[in-house]
């Protein structure tokens, strides 16, 4: 923020002294105005710092029954949480038709990759899994399609929302406007989207092996839900599946927004689509090559790896 001050008193005759009254008035302005500018600058810095501490912008709340539910209206069902789920394991996703392993379906402003019959791995296995650069994950899994996924607190590194790996719950739903939706891959290779209205135990009983999520559900069980405001002008990442159970990893670029994203995927016959962490966290690679780079080279807490 730039503040420009214009003096009320301008010198019109070089070398002429200003009246004492002018000096007193200038001194008064300095005593009153400068502290105000300093204090406002501190407030701006604090507010700006607070705004940038999360890994993505907090989604807008809505009163829609199918949108993000305000935290005051939801009681989170208790569930047993495991501190660490052990070494991450792969889950085979079974697609109904045989296609190429990875297919680029991207359009202007929206990066879209379809994965057919992939093996899938979730990197995060604990509430504070540590953060990693995309290059770290590529080095470990070079022949893979990789995308950032779940949101996390950039200060503590703690992952947010419903988190499952190896069939074990290591973080329950967050009673907040973010961390309120998750894309689930089950042990049998099927996939489904859930929100925080479904208890963790119910999801686990249905065979949940891995979960990925952050914002809200845009498509659930084949139905497009009302726009809840969680997809704005920023970069956003998504995960979904179609009627043949192919997995889709998607990133919409700056200013594409909700309408542009939904238009880009309109013909994909998606059954579920969940908003993931976005902004500087959004990043994708395929077989070691960068498909979409993080804006600020950001390390993140959770990736999905498909091979």
Image: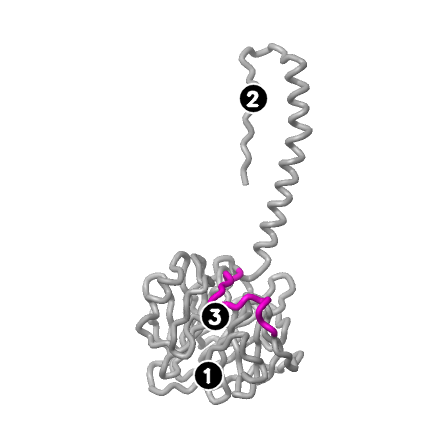
**Can you tell which quarter of the image residue 159 is in?**
bottom right
302 drawn magenta? no
Q: Residues within 10 Å of mark 2 (few under 14, many from 20)?
A: few
Q: Residues within 10 Å of mark 3 (few under 14, many from 20)?
A: few
State the extent of the magenta-drawn residues as a range: 58-75
Residue underneath mark 1: 119
Identity of the residue drawn at 45% across and 76% down = 144
Mark toward the start of the polypeptide (2 vs 1):
2
Query: Percent x, y for residue 88?
Result: 57, 81
Q: Does residue 264 appear in the picture of this structure?
A: yes
- Determine the residue located farthest toward the left in the rendered image: 267
- Judge by depth and name the residue closer to the eye, 257 or 137: 257
**Can you tell which quarter of the image residue 153 is in?**
bottom right
Q: From mark 1 to mark 3, how far is it between C-alphas?
A: 35 Å
Residue underneath mark 2: 8
Answer above or below: position of 13 versus 120: above
68 drawn magenta? yes
Secondary structure type for disc 2: loop
Secondary structure type for disc 3: loop
Q: From mark 2 to mark 1, how far is it between C-alphas?
A: 71 Å
Q: Nearer the viewer, mark 1 or mark 3?
A: 3
Q: Quadrant of the N terminus?
A: top right
Q: Which numbered marker is on residue 65?
A: 3
């Amino acid at each position: 923020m730039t503040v420009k001050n214009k003096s009320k008193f301008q010198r019109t005759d070089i070398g002429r002294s200003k009246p004492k009254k002018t000096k007193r008035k200038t001194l008064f302005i300095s005593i009153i105005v400068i502290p105000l500018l300093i204090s406002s600058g501190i407030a701006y810095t604090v507010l700006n710092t607070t705004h940038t501490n999360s890994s993505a912008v907090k989604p807008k709340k809505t009163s829609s029954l199918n949108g993000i539910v305000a935290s005051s209206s939801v009681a989170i069902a208790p569930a047993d949480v495991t501190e660490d789920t052990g070494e991450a394991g792969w889950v085979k996703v079974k697609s109904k038709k045989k296609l190429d392993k990875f297919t680029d379906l991207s359009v202007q402003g929206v990066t879209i990759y379809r994965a057919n019959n992939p093996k899938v791995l979730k990197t995060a296995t604990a509430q504070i899994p540590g953060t990693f650069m995309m290059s770290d994950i590529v080095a470990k899994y070079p022949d893979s399609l990789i995308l950032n996924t779940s949101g996390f607190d950039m200060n503590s590194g703690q992952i947010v929302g419903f988190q499952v790996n190896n069939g074990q719950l290591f973080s329950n739903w967050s009673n907040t406007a973010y961390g309120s939706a998750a894309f689930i891959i089950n042990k049998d290779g099927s996939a489904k989207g859930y929100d925080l209205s479904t208890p963790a135990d119910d999801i686990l009983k249905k065979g949940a092996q891995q979960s990925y999520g952050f914002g809200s559900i845009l498509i659930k069980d084949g139905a497009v839900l009302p726009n809840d405001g969680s997809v704005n002008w920023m970069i956003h990442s998504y995960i979904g599946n179609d009627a043949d159970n192919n997995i889709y990893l998607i990133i919409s670029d700056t200013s594409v927004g909700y309408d542009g994203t939904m238009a880009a995927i309109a013909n994909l016959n998606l059954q579920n689509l969940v908003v993931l962490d976005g902004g500087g966290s959004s990043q994708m690679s395929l077989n070691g090559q960068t498909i979409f780079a993080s804006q600020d080279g950001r390390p993140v807490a959770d990736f999905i790896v498909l091979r």
